[in-house]
Amino acid sequence: MSMTFKVREVGGVTIVDLSGKITMGEGSPTLREEVHKLVAEGKKKIVLNLADVNYIDSSGLGELVSSYTSVKNSGGELKLLNLTSRVRDLLVITKLVTVFDVKDDEATAVSSFA
């Protein structure tokens, strides 16, 4: 199953609900394109909801980092929401959990933007 996503707005924050796998050749280019499009539209507060992401590989992690960098370079903030235990473990092992602002519930994520 490749990655799918749905974009919605909550309190001035753009939430991207991701579902499926973030891997090379499946979901990764789609994620990058969507984040670049949001940045081009002037979106500065972006949350990636990973609750329904069941698998992520090294290239998928690279896409998360690339997305984070794109948003940060445009003066915005990107946060991760609802990590599955598998994705959380991967971020801990790679120490990327120290790079991303990770939230466990949507209300906290939305209210955490300055």
Image: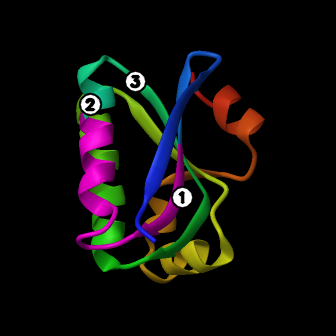
The tag on residue 37 is: 2
Labels 1 and 2: the sequence-earlier one: 1
Element type at mark 1: strand
Q: Amino acid at mark 2?
A: Lys
**1 vs 2, front mark:** 1
Q: Residue furthest front?
A: 1
Q: Tell me what residue is drawn at x 43 percent, y 34 percent.
A: 77
Residue 25 image position (x, y, % from top left): 23, 70
Q: Quadrant of residue 108?
A: top right
Residue 39 image position (x, y, % from top left): 29, 27
Residue 41 image position (x, y, % from top left): 29, 18
Labels 2 and 3: the sequence-earlier one: 2
Q: Amino acid at mark 3?
A: Lys
Question: Where does label 3 land, which residue?
Answer: 44
Element type at mark 3: loop
Q: Residues within 10 Å of mark 3 (few under 14, many from 20)?
A: many
Question: Where does label 1 land, which residue?
Answer: 19
Residues under labels 2 and 3: Cα distance? 12 Å
Q: Tell me what residue is drawn at x 37 percent, y 79 percent.
A: 57
Q: Which residues are magenta?
A: 17-36
Q: How many marks?
A: 3
Element type at mark 2: helix
The reply to whether the C-beta atoms of the residues labelled 1 and 2 are less than 8 Å apart is: no
Residue 22 left/right relative to 72:
right
| In magenta stretch: residue 20 | yes
Q: Amino acid at mark 1?
A: Ser
Q: Tell me what residue is drawn at x 23 percent, y 35 percent.
A: 73
**2 vs 3, front mark:** 2
82 or 8, nearer to the observer: 8
Residue 91 image position (x, y, % from top left): 49, 73
The reply to whether the C-beta atoms of the residues labelled 1 and 3 are less than 8 Å apart is: no
